[in-house]
Each structure stands twice: as structure tokens, then as C-alpha cells.
């Protein structure tokens, strides 16, 4: 290889090295900023609940305050709730266990139904649930799904 060819190869390598170095620095910077963002969003301690935890009596006010805000961030989506004062707990596992109980409770409701359901699909059970909720609305029961 001639001296001129070696010089050209050296310049070519340096010419290729700069964009690669800039790309590497950019990727490291993006990675570091992403981790910094993840660390900033780390979940705060949730137990014991803080003094500002939402109680059953303050839930409506807390909801109204949250909805009135225009500066909500991802970190605000986690809500701390005060200790429960429930006297008992009955775990109901699988749909064949809890859907009949839900339908019984919906049929027996007199003033309100507050149901947190992550989703249901049309079909026998879903249609029955919708019909029960519509019937409750028809009897004057407030329904929140």
C-alpha cells in the first residue's frame, strides 16, 4: 500500500470515527436522561399512609380537587388512601364465584352502586351485568362504573 493510500485510509477512518463517537455520546446521554426520568417517577413510600391520605369521607372532595387541577403529572396518579375500617373481607376468586354475588348485590342496591371493573366483554355474563345495571338505574339507583 502506498503512502498516499495509507493517508486516505487514515482520513477515512477519522471521518467515520467522529459520527460514531457523536452517536455513542448521544446514546449514552439519552440513556442517562431516561434513567433519571425513571428515578424521578419512583413510587413514594405507601405504607403507612401519609397524613394527607384520602379517607372515605373526603373522597368526593379529593376527586373534585384532582379534577380541577391543570398541572397533573404521572406521579399524581397514585393516590394514598387511609386505612380501611372494613369489619370483614371475603375474597371471591374466579368469575363463577364473584359474578353471581355482584348480580345479587346490584339487584339489592337501594341508593348507589360503585363498581370498579377493568373491563368486560359482550356475552352471557357481560350482557347480564349490563342488564342488571340498567335495571338499577331504572329503579333510581345511582350507578358509577
Image (spheres, rainbow, N blue to C red):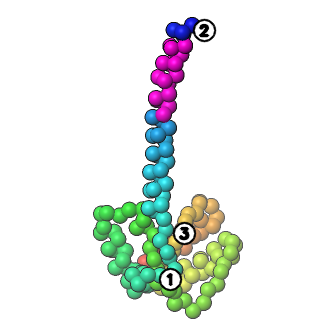
**Where's residue 73, x and y in %?**
38, 62
* Quadrant that contains the N terminus: top right
**Helix, strand or loop at mark 2:** loop
Disc 1 vs disc 2: Cβ atoms closer than 8 Å? Answer: no
In this picture, which residue range is highlighted in magenta?
Answer: 6-21
Q: Quadrant of residue 93?
A: bottom right
**Where's residue 59, x and y in %?**
40, 80
Q: Using the image, determine if residue 23 lies above or below residue 113.
A: above
Instruction: Determine crowd level at label 2: few under 14, some 14-19, many 20+ residues with C-alpha closer than 10 A.
Output: few
Circle 3 residue? 117
Labelled disc at residue 48: 1
**Where's residue 64, x and y in %?**
33, 74
Q: Earlier in the sequence, mark 2 or mark 3?
A: 2
Q: Quadrant of residue 75?
A: bottom left
As for residue 35 lying within the magenta part, the answer is: no
Circle 2 residue? 1
Instruction: Determine crowd level at label 1: few under 14, some 14-19, many 20+ residues with C-alpha closer than 10 A.
Output: few
Q: Residue at x 45, y 34 (%)?
A: 22
Q: Nearer the viewer, residue 113 or 7?
A: 7
Q: Residue at x 32, y 74 (%)?
A: 65
Instruction: Determine crowd level at label 3: few under 14, some 14-19, many 20+ residues with C-alpha closer than 10 A.
Output: few
Q: Is residue 50 something one can see in this rendering?
A: yes
Amino acid at each position: 500500500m502506498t503512502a498516499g493510500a495509507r493517508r486516505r485510509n487514515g482520513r477515512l477512518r477519522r471521518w467515520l470515527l467522529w459520527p460514531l463517537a457523536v452517536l455513542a455520546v448521544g446514546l449514552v446521554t439519552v440513556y442517562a436522561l431516561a434513567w433519571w426520568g425513571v428515578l424521578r417517577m419512583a413510587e413514594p413510600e405507601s405504607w403507612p399512609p401519609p397524613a394527607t391520605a384520602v379517607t372515605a369521607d373526603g373522597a368526593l372532595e379529593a376527586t373534585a380537587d384532582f379534577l380541577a387541577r391543570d398541572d397533573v403529572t404521572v406521579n399524581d396518579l397514585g393516590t394514598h388512601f387511609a386505612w380501611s375500617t372494613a369489619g370483614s373481607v371475603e375474597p371471591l376468586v374466579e368469575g363463577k364465584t364473584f359474578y353471581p354475588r355482584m348480580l345479587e348485590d346490584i339487584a339489592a342496591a337501594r341508593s348507589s352502586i360503585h363498581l370498579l371493573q377493568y373491563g368486560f366483554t359482550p356475552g352471557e355474563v357481560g350482557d347480564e351485568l349490563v342488564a342488571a345495571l340498567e335495571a338499577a338505574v331504572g329503579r333510581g339507583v345511582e350507578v358509577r362504573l
